[in-house]
Amino acid sequence: MSTSSLRRASRAAIVEPEPTHSAAVIALPTTAASAPGANVTPRQQATPKTRKFLRRPVLLGALTPLALLALWALSSRAGLVPQLILPAPATVYDAFIALVQSGELFANLSISVQRVALGFAAGAGLGLLLGAGMGLSPRLERFLRPTFLTVAQIPVLAWIPFLMILFGIGEALKIVIIAKAALIPVTLNTLDGFRNVPRAYLEVGRIYRFNNLQILRSIMLPGALLPVFTGLRYGLTHAWHSLVVVELLASTEGLGYQMVMARQLFQLDVMIATMIVIGVIGFTLDKILAQAETSLRRRYGAAA
Amino acid sequence: MTNLGTLDIRNVNKRFQVAGDGFAAIDDLSLTVEPGEFLSLVGPSGCGKSTLLRLISGLDGDYGGEIQLGGTRISGTSLTRGLIFQEHRLFPWLTVEENIALALENSHLSASEKRASIAEHIALVGLNGFEKAYPRQLSGGMAQRAAIARGLVNRPALLLLDEPFGALDALTRAHMQEELQQIWQAEGITMVLVTHDVDEALYLGDRVVVMAPRPGRIAKIVDVDLPRPRDRTDGGFTHLKAEVLEALGEPR
Amino acid sequence: MNRFEKYLGSGVTLPLLILAAWYLGVHDGFLDPRIWASPEGVIATAREQLTDGSLYEALGASLKRDLLGVLGGTLVGLALGVGLGTVRLLDELLSPLLNGVKHIALFTWIPLMSIWLGNGELAKVTFIGFAVFLPVLLNTYQGVRSVDPRLLDVARVLKLTRTQTLRKVILPSAAPSIATGIHLALIYGWLATIGAEYLFAVAPGIGSSIMEGREQFRMDLVILGMAIIGGVGFLLNVVANRLQARVLRWQAPQ
């Protein structure tokens, strides 16, 4: 049975659209993912001409955000935009500093990070077990698959009210939600990774009469490393986005709650500052993991 | 098809920049191709034969010297100059028929004339029955025939062929060479064929231009004064072949 | 495979076990009946909502919102994706900004949007459109940028104009990516619809009715809502796959 249908089903399980990632996930089972690399074309090769222009896009790319920022600042100063609709950049900055100095930001941030860490650890741990188990044993896969797909098919958003009834709005709710968000991509990618370890490697193992444990340790685990890591990366991103949702909906602490409070008090400066903090953390997480994935791929790329 | 006259290549230079260094892909090359002539260009990789073809087609500009067709300098691509690539380069989302029709997008024919011309060219390359097939459903030889039909459907005065049979197996290749020759004889088109294959060059060409690399230049021009269709085992043929091979192996 | 495996090891065993545990739990008391609805209770509620039409009403309202947002977001995403993919200056000016924006968790936009656009339909549909716009844009852009330059050479040899090249070469070549983008749009649009109904002011819809169920501790309503949300997502996926297969017939292996 192909994992592509599994993957496709997993789309609906994502609480938060993550365009590039999900696009990559959805493209994986088809050959689309390899297509850009496959047609190595003159345009994609670094010809001297493109190298010369390399610096230009960076400057131009910075231009638009800077221009928007300037426009924002100027129109605030000129009184074109009421502070109640969009506070001036300086006001947002002041709000950020105030949040830092009062310790409020740090308190909320650390709560949020704790939740993600716990939920992700639980979800990813279970996902690794499930994925590896199903990848190694077709029997287990046959047994679990429909149930897993059903759970995956119902998005995190739809689980939240159900779990709110069961657990109230305490910590348990957040941990379970975040764990569920991380579980799906980790399981699917791990399953895929184990399934797609090239048969040729397994045959090498058989020639040298490896036992099951040796096969697992020296062939399956290293062979599945890359997809497993990819799964962890998606898992963490999904966990982060789910955290935001659940904190927006049902929380009395954390970054999401900070936004909800600010919304109720019409503190747009605090809201925007918090949004930026959430965005920067998401961005940083993603960049670090993408970087790690690239270096892993460079080292183990041939195995995948 | 109109006769656009002589293809005149005079003192052409083409340089590429690689890692900051310029190198001459073509160095001071001059060549004249008469209307209706079949000219073969052979040479090792890097001798500039494909580059020359791209210059004549107008795909690449920015060269030194002069390339004229019937007295006017070539600039940009033109429907009077067809180009057939080594890979068929059919559009995978279009059927054979639609791929050929795409070449007529900017012709002044009426819809019914277009239909007739497409059908005629499909028949010419022997693809009857495959009008509605997608490229992926065709064998390599069939796809290349479709590409040739696409190249011919505009009735170009000059057809440029860049190793068109390079990716085909030997049998299909021999067969396609024969067909190309028949088309050339029937339509009277000027053809310039780039190839690695000395047999192919001699079998088809009125003249064989042997090129040498670094810098890309003409090493020798061999006149093929043999009656068509030619016999590859004929003494004259093998003699010329030896001559071409010698010219190919000579300069270092 | 022995008999045991054939029957007990199959995929339906676990769901049946869960169902049985649920049923017995509610009736034999190890699940709190004040919290848990029984399986037959959920079915009864579903039947009731189907007959009095409230289910259609809620689902209709959600789907209408979804459709409007998806349509708007997809059109804007497509246009901008083609623009960024073909006009280099536009690409250089806007891509870094868009790449930054996509990292801001989608639902954090809702509080801000509620201030700018209010809490009504306009805000909801705009949010859904916004959620859809980025994946469509990114996939379109990627598709347009990865057109095989060798095919673009052919277009030049055939003397196709800019518009013809766009229509006959670039767009068909980007079609697989664009289809992926639209597939994602359908899925994200549906998620955004539910999220919008949770987080903006209450209005008729499937997301609102599930939240209402939670407030009234009506587990039957909540479970029914979950099933519907999952089911609609599933159907959207099926539809998208069909569409993709149809549009990309030329690609199918044969």
Image (tube, rainbow, N blue to C red):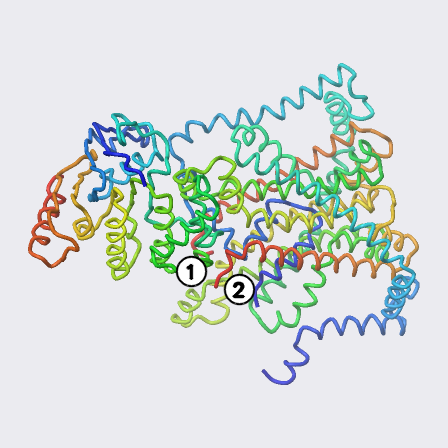
Residue C123, percent from left and from top: 80, 38
Q: Residues within 10 Å of mark 2 (few under 14, many from 20)?
A: many
Quadrant (top left, top right, bottom left, bottom right) of the C terminus of chain B? top left
Judge if badges 1 and 2 mark residues of a common chain: no
Residue occupied by mark 1: B130
Q: Judge depth for marks 1 and 2 and give the one in front.
A: 1
Q: Is residue A38 visible?
A: no
Quadrant (top left, top right, bottom left, bottom right) of the N terminus of chain B? top left
Residues B16 and A156: in front is B16
Q: Say left or right for A154 vs A46.
A: right
Query: Looking at the rendered structure, which numbered label has been put on residue A61?
Result: none
Chain name for mark 1: B
Residue C216, percent from left and from top: 93, 55
Amino acid type of the residue tagged 2 in the rendering: Arg
| Quarter of the figure with residue C71 | top right
Residue C31, percent from left and from top: 87, 67
Q: Residue at x 48, y 64 (%)?
A: C254
Q: Residue at x 89, y 57 (%)?
A: C54
Residue occupied by mark 2: A195
Q: Is A176 drawn above or below residue C32 in the view shown?
A: above
Q: Residue at x 17, y 55 (%)?
A: B229
| Quarter of the figure with residue C111 | top right
Circle 2: element type: helix
Q: Is A36 drawn above or below residue A197 in the view shown?
A: above
Q: Is B206 drawn above or below residue B138 in the view shown?
A: above
